[in-house]
Amino acid sequence: MVFMRNDPMPASPAWTEVHAAKLVSAEQAIRCIPRGRRILIGSGAAEPSGLVEAMCSHGHHLADNEIVHLMTLGPAPYVAPELAGRFRHTAFFIGANVRDAVLDGRADFMPVFLSELPELIRSRRIRIDVALVQVSPPDRHGYVSLGVSVDVVRAAVDSAALVLAEVNPHMPRTHGDSFVHVDRIDRLVAVDVPLYEHAREAPGEVELAIGGHVASLIPDGATLQTGIGKLPDAVLGALTCHHDLGIHTEMLSDGVMELARAGVITGRRKTLLPAKMVTSFVMGTRALYEWVDENPAIEMRPSEFVNDPMVIARNQAMIAINSCLAVDLTGQVAADTLLGKFFSGIGGQVDFVRGAARSVGGKAIIALPSTAKSGQVSRIQPALEQGAGVVTSRGDVRYVVTEHGVADLWDKNIRERAMALIAIAHPDHRAELLAAAKQRRYVFADQVIPRAHPWVEEQTIPLRHGGTALLRPVRVTDEPALHDLFYRLSEDSIYKRFLQVKQRHPHEELQRYVDVDDAHSMAIVALAGGELVALARYDLDPATRLADCAFVVCDGWQGRGIGTALLRRLHEIAEARGLDGFQADALATNRAMLDVFHESGLRFQTSTDSGVVHLEARFAAGTKVVSNLGDVEAR
């Protein structure tokens, strides 16, 4: 699709007369290009398609010319086999229009960080001899705008020996470092053509689920980097209830525009260029191009600024959201290769991952669907396939998100990373991944498979004396946190919980607590202050249909209502699952635990033997449990 203004900006009546000496046809402009030189073509929607077509159809004098560019939305006739004697393409980022040529060996790929590419151009390590670009008409001062594409085009225009520009009244005039004086341009070609559009696709269920998980990691006031497509749109769509977000991103899309119009993106809390949406290129629909035209909130900057990790890090709470093709169980990310073949490029992923990691309160997020090929292939893999390139190293990766949840890999060892990633893989592939992890000695030989629980609801509860706690189902990946909880308990708390003195809590014991099968057991954890502070669990006795119930709360968090909330939540789940009731044993001296049972809303019958109180409560048939946690959903 292409973009055309409803009311095209009229060209200045004087510009064609003032610059008549430079005004030529596309065919005449192409004749200025010498043989054997390197030619850069403008990026994205700013591809000067008229000059490109003329170069291929009328550039018979050309030979052995190299063509370079980032992804372009228009056609790429120069990679046609019959033009091999004239042109050889090198892709800084492989787009759909040149992918087959790269795979066939008729074109080349240069892996490069987008932040470093302008310096390579300016230093002439990548010498740009000719720049073919598209610009807006000049203003009364003689300045044109690079419009929707500044990225590496700025460096090319500043460095090239020959600059040929299509002047298009449909090109938006954008603010920032986008202006070029006509004196810098050698030939002007007047065109009146629409810009290429990137059509939007509605996110599916998988993308919407991923968007929700990513949104949960983003605080109010954060500054975002995101891309284009169904997944980024799903993330942005999940942020409609956020406040005062900012933008610092290499590419600006329609989703950003919609959040800005809704008042979600204001940039008020940005620590770098407040109130400005900083970007290097704009790609999307006609509405987006109209919106950025003369919009003072849009700050177009070249890639050496937008993608510089040190610049990115100056934004506090910088959230970088990137996608990939696959992740292995150690956290390595493959983003530019597919089935051992080059697919896209490094782009700005590493720049923003590292910049966000160094931002105060920043987070670097890798988001991807858990499967490919209609669920047949897991994108989380034991090891990256042969020929796959690692774009983002395991040392850089922090958060990985699929539709099945969030894996926080920062500060995790290989065993913990593997389990966290298996837990967010598709349930159909978890057993295979765990078997591979065991074969590689990544995990314990008796490690259980992370289960896909039908009940995944999380709830936040208020605590006595202030603060809140998050209640959620236990996960197999909670084992390290549970280890920490048990070893922080006082000897008195240990004795009261286990009715014995315990010196050790080995892996085998901890794994039993975090492994639940839903039909016969359930466990809930409470998290507060960033730590796991409590665990409650029941296990069904099939003979009596009563569940043995027990819980433990860290000493420093006792007396704040956590135990009561956990027991009430377990009650809701147990009754919804058709259990008949609870039973438990507690020391007669453990008044705090006994109070929790009696405050739960259940009527416990008690009996005492040798200082141990046995409690038993049966659920009333047909009654509805009332608590401050809401109703359980049996899903």
Image (spheres, rainbow, N blue to C red):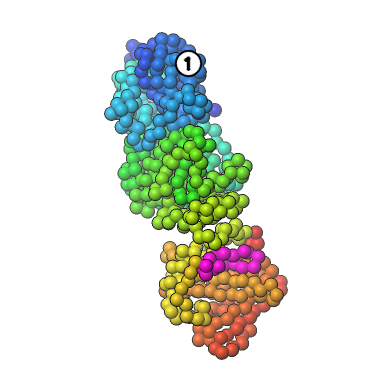
Helix, strand or loop at label 1? It is: helix
Q: 617 or 285: nearer the eye?
A: 617
Q: Which residue is at a point 52% across and 47% down the rendered structure image? A: 381
Vertical comparison of 16 with 141: above or below: above
Can residue 50 be seen at all in this image of the molecule?
no
Can residue 397 be seen at all in this image of the molecule?
yes
Q: Which residues are magenta?
A: 508-524
Q: Position of residue 217 (x, y in %)?
A: 46, 53
Vertical comparison of 99 with 569: above or below: above
Q: Which residue is at a point 43% across and 56% down the rendered structure image? A: 413
Q: Position of residue 617 (x, y in %)?
A: 64, 79
Q: Which residue is at a point 62% across and 64% down the rendered structure image? A: 517
Q: Position of residue 380 (x, y in %)?
A: 53, 47
**In the displayed structure, does residue 606 sit left or right of residue 69?**
right
Residue 143 on the magenta segment:
no
Vertical comparison of 204 with 565: above or below: above
Q: 271 or 69: nearer the eye?
A: 69
Residue 523 on the magenta segment:
yes
Crowdedness of circle 1 by 10 Å Cα count: few (<14), some, many (20+)?
some
Q: Amino acid at mark 1?
A: Leu
- Residue extending farthest to the left is 123
Q: 256 or 538: nearer the eye?
A: 538
- Residue picked out by circle 1: 83
